[in-house]
Image (spheres, rainbow, N blue to C red):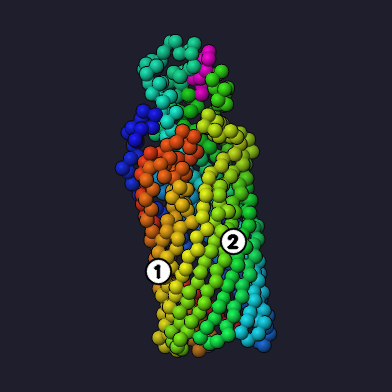
Amino acid sequence: FDIGGWKEDPLAGSSSGPVYQKLYIPGIGVPKWKLPAALGAGMGFSFNRPGSPWTFATASYVPQAVGVDRSQDPNDPTRFDGRSMVIQRLVYLSPSVAYKVSDTFSLGLAIPIAHQSFALDTDMRFPNKLLGIIGKLQDAWCSDGGNPLDTFGFGLCGGGKEGRLRPFNRAGTMKFDMTAPVDPTYNLGLLWEPKDWFAFGAVYQSGTKTTLTGRYTFMADPMFPRFVQGMYGSLLGPVVAAMFGFPTSIPDVQTGNATMRLPFPAHLQAGIKLKPTDRIQFNMDAMYTDWSKWDKLEIQFDRQVALLQMARVFGQADASKLVIPRGYHDPIHFGFGLEVGITRGFKLRYGYEPRKTSIPQSAFDLIAPLPTMTVRSLGMGYESPSGLKIDATYSYAKGKYDIPAETSCNLNCSNFFNVIYNPYAGLDVSGSMTVRYGGMSITKPF
């Protein structure tokens, strides 16, 4: 382990602390509260005139929600890859229509209209070999009081001790708050029930190339601003700085408007129902999601970001945008369910879903650390003689990840040109994720 001559990374051997939940409230943003759990409520209505083949409906629900808050400990090592992060899609209106073609076959169409949000707050550091080499050169060339000859050279000492490059030091903080208030898609579904004991259903949920707009903030720690200040205060430093495309200065805070393309992937799901007896029912579903649309995330800024101009020496030519490679895959996974009728109106349910991750090891990071997980669920359902239905479920999912050093160039590569973004270059990163969630629905005919 050697990053340009630096071998003692203070994050080596450290571990992350408690993780809380985050959510995005449309019109408000991300609240500052620390939530041990995220709560949400949905609502839906449907209308069917007795004897009519048509049914009309609408609903509100959340098809996508990832919210992580690691800010409890200010020294949490994961703060360099997402101190807090929210990716959330809230469907607030979903006009739907279904038509019963025959006693055994039905079709449906829905137009979900969603609010898509993305918020990120992260510290940044750049453990890169070139930064380490320059830092060692500064230590050798500059004494505690500086070097009088440096003024006639490249200005390596002009920034003082604060301007000495350290690959493991924090370089700054990056924040985004972006939304797409109205983002429609469409869903198509069918249900075929030729027998009481057999049924087949399928649904296609279209994707969308969502464009989000919002604000960005870059806050620079003294290291890079003082380094640039020192170079431009010397004789030859401005020549070298201009050759590498360095900014003439780096403000402590830079804010502005940004645009981001965040695709919502299409989803296809098909399943069968087998009911060998009146009280036992088996379900099996196959699911496919087009996550390969996330080949990269590109954020376009309204101007050149001075802090990102420092990365031009590593091949990042355009400091007016930030490109984060993703390289996700499109796995197919299956889910299995069992329902047992205990009494005429009371049922118990069990579900099992080995869910493959869409994130290959070569693209894994801690912004959305979603490994392959096994989901197990328990549920119950009750229907009263008047038609009132109450359903409840509890699910438990757990998965582990182990990313050896130099495996993911979104996380821990130390290659010279992989400066954006590998905050844990040269380190092994491992961990686990556990998700517990429950839900309840009440359906009342009237």
| Figure quadrant of residue 126 | top left
Q: Nearer the viewer, residue 189 or 85?
A: 189
- Name the residue type under label 2: Ala
Residue of label 1: 376
Give the vertical position of 162 relative to 118 (above or below): above
Residue of label 2: 266
For residue 260, say whether it is visible: yes
- Indicate which disc residue 76 carries: none
Give the vertical position of 209 relative to 55 (above or below): above
Q: Residue at x 56, y 40 (%)?
A: 322
| Figure quadrant of residue 306 | top right
Magenta part mainly helix, strand or loop? helix
Magenta residues span 228-237
Q: Position of residue 366 (x, y in %)?
A: 44, 48
Q: Residue at x 40, y 41 (%)?
A: 406
Q: Residues within 10 Å of mark 1 (few under 14, many from 20)?
A: some
Give the vertical position of 34 relative to 153 (above or below): below
